Every structure is written in structure tokens, then in C-alpha cells.
Amino acid sequence: MPNSKQTPGEMGENSVPNAKALSRREFLRIAGLSGAAIAVTGGLGGVLSACGGSETTTTSAAAVTTTGAAATTTTSAATSTSASAGAETGREIKVGFVSPLTGPIALFGVPDQYCATRWTEAVKDGLVCGDGKNHPVTILVRDSQSDSNRAAQVGGDLITNDKVDVIMAASTNDTVTPVAGQAEAMGCPMFSNDAPWQAYYLSRNPPAEGFKWTWHAFWGLEDIEGTFTSMWESMQTNKLVAGMWPNDADGNAWADPKIGFPGVVPALGYKVVYAGGYQNGTEDYTSIITDIKKAGCEILTGVPIPPDFPVMWSQMLQQGFKPPVATVGRALLFPLGLEAIGPSGYGLSTEVWWTPRHPFKSSLTGETCQQFADDFEARTGLQWTQPLLHYGVFEVVVDSLKRTTNVDDKEEIVKAISSTKMETIGGPIDFTSPVDPNSLHPVPNVYRTPLVGGQWIKGTGKWPFELVVVDNKMGPAIATDAKLQPINYT
């Protein structure tokens, strides 16, 4: 448990030193993501990464195989924790999963391979579905390569060529939304998380009654805006906000002039300085930094991809832009990303959608969030990371299949998904509750999961950085650890 008494404003160790220049290539090298898959080995193995080449990793216990740069992974399970010894054997059930195992957002894919191993273990003895039969389960993992077009391609291949019964996705709108488009068009049941719901839902022009095949559980723009502004309200600033939103699915949603930050936060007295969406992979942010310095911004926000923020942040510090508050989504989710930034990351704040201290349990194993995070660290040698929440997509799929009386009928499977009411390791999901725009069930296909705000501080134990929860306005069920402190640039 982090020490809530230790904050960046009180500890000299948490002050920000002068930053050195950091390129995207250096970030990828430091984070171990230079174009190759990272795979969880069997038993108590670690995370293997290959920088700039191909790597084949075979997991003996869970049969996870990752091959080459395309990183196509097949996870087979012979038979489920819920298996009945006397149940008749049913046909094999195939479940597909699309994840960015390689490329610029591959930090999301690191926990995915751990989750795939754990999913396999959960159904190793088969899954007894609503038909009373014990069905072997095969999980097919495909690499989006951090590219939305490829996400759509491999999602379509899973449906048409591999003929999966259900498909899953996570890891930002660049992964989830294109796969959802394929699933809806091809009539395949799908469940997903880790994509703000407005971009996932509204960008696909939903019919009045909602989508039929695609279902999703994650927070929305109302949650991120409410959380970020609540953190900012606790600080003394001039309320001038520098908005660094890239030209991608997430960035365009956060920067939307109606439902994004520019359309919402002015009502709270904030003025947004937004120079237009930059391109992912930008190496020189001088012109943007010049504009936000000239405007006198004292708050930085945005949703850059992990390799871009270290470059952006180091250039800001070098050019004298040192805001008291820097609250950034996506890129600051990951301990590996903070380690690549170094000590200049102390005091940065971000979204928090899962921690080991969240008060939830897995429906598959009964593990608490803390136990699940501890197991991840023991098996991989890495610090826990928020996308472990992705484990919950399979929890919903398993629960739905248990209630499906005819697994050969996709209509029956999606009907079961649409009537889900359960608790997962990421929180409760209840599609049976009334649809109300002001509720946790704002549209037919979406249920909102909790979001709180956090700040990175100097680690007090094994890890160099610790993430403490500093604001729970939008997620009161999640306890806070500390109060937000201004970044110390001493």
C-alpha cells in the first residue's frame, strides 16, 4: 500500500530535475517495445521481449505461442473451472481476442498475454454451458500491431476464417472500434473494454435501439472530464489548459468541440488552448510548446500514445514550459512508460481505471484485485499495470456462455451477453438496468466502469514509481490514498 503521507510536494526525491532529450526510438528501446511481441512464459516465467527482431515464445503450461513480427497467438485450453465430471462433452468453442502485441501502443499488449495465459488456466478443464455439456475452449489471440486497419483485418479473419463463436478486444479505440465494426457487420457476438464509450459507440452511427452484436464496459468522456477537472479544482491555477490531443480516435474524441474537453470544461471556468491535432510519431513539438507558453497555460492535459509523451515532455521542460499540473491520459498509465521518462515523471497525474486496491473480485477465480496484481508481478517480474482490467472481458464471455443453451446459435450467445449482470475484477456490469443517459448504463450497449484520478510519486519499495489515487469524485467506491500535489520543479 502506498504511503499516503508521501507526496511530490513534500518529498525532495520527487522533485523534477532537468530533463534530457528523449526520442521515440529511445523510449521504445527502454520500454522493450522495439517491434517485437512480449510473451508470458509458462509457470513462473518472465516477460520476454525482442528489440528489432522476431521472437518465438512457447508457453508449456498454457500453450501460448507467439510467432514473428505479426505475433499471431493461439491459446488452447483442453477443457473449465466449472466443468462437471459427469457432463457430456460438447463441441469446441472458439473465442477470439485482438490486442496490440507490437507497435507504439504495445504496452497495452503486455498484460494481455498474461491475461490470455490466465484465461486458459481458468477453462483448462472445459466450460459447462447452458446446454449442460462440457465444452473445450480455444482462445485465439491476434496482434493488431497497434494499427486500426490491421485490427479490423485480423478481427474479420477471426470471424470469417477461424469462425470464432465470440470475439473480444481491448486497448484503446484504435483497437476496439474497428473490431466492433467488423463484428457488427458480420454478426458475431463481441464484448470489449478499455475504450471511452462515446468514441466506441457514437462513431459507428448507432441505430436508435443500439447495436445488436457488440457490447462494451468502460468509462466515458463525462468521467474523464469530471475526474480531471476535480483534480484541477484542488489546485491554485489560472485555469488555462494546454490540450495536447493527437489526431487519432482517442485524441479526436477528447478534443471534440461538443462532448470533449473544449466543449465541456469552459463551463467550469477553464479556457482550452488547442492548436489542432498533431500526428502520432511527431518528433518536434516546438511550435505547439511556443503557443501554449505564450498563452500562459498552467495546466497540461492530453492523451498521447506512450512513445510520444516522453519526447513531448522532455522538450517542454527544456523549453521552459513547467506547468504546476500535468494530467495526461493513456501514455501515463504504465510504470514502464514512467521509467522511460525517469525522475521528471514524478508528480505527473493521470486517469486511473484499475489498481490492486480496487474493491472487486474475479468471477472466475475469486481473486481480489491485489491477489491478481501480485500474481502478475510474480509471473512476469513486472510491476502491475492498469490494463490488467482486460481480464474482465473473458469473465463476461464465460458468464454468458454458461447461460447459453445453444452455443451453435450466435443469437443465443449475444442474448446472454446483453443480459449480463455480474461483478468482474474491473467492477460491476449490469445490462439489465434501465438505459438512462445520466446513469452507469447510458446507452443500450455500454455499461460504465469506475474512473478515478491518480498521481505518480517516488516508489517507497520495490518499484521506482508508485501510482496513488488522489481523486474519487467520479468513482466514490474507490478509496483515495493522498491529495494531488503540484509538480516540484526544484
Image: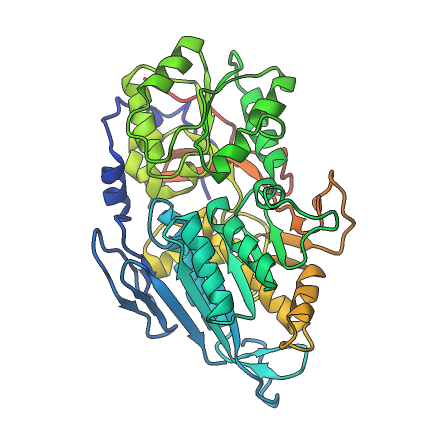
Lateral position of residue 306 relative to residue 424, left or right: left
Residue nearest the observer in this picture, 373 or 340: 340
The vertical placement of 191 against 340, above or below, is below
Q: Position of residue 342 (x, y in %)?
A: 29, 33
Q: Position of residue 96 (x, y in %)?
A: 49, 65
Vertical arrangement, residue 194 with respect to residue 423, above or below? above
Residue drawn at 50 percent across, 27 percent down: 484
Which picture quadrant has residue 319?
A: top left
Q: Is residue 442 left or right of residue 3?
A: right
- Quadrant position of residue 198: top right
Q: Is residue 327 above or below residue 320?
A: below
Q: Position of residue 210 (x, y in %)?
A: 70, 51
At 70% from the left and 46% from the top, the residue drawn is 443
How many numbered discs sit on the rendered protein?
Answer: 0
Which picture quadrant has residue 256?
top right
Quick check: 305 above or below 383? above
The structure residue drawn at horizontal position 51% and vertical position 51%, both measured from the top left corner, is 178
The colour scheme used here is rainbow
- Judge from the rendering whether residue 387 lies leftward or rightward of residue 339; answer left or right: right
Q: Residue at x 42, y 22 (%)?
A: 9
Where's the C terminus, which quadrant?
top left
> Of 102 and 13, which appears nearest the observer?
102
Task: Decide which of 296, 353 is in the foreground and name it.
Answer: 296
Can residue 166 be seen in this snapshot? Answer: yes
Residue found farthest to the right: 434
Residue 425 visible in the current orientation: no
Q: Position of residue 463 (x, y in %)?
A: 34, 44
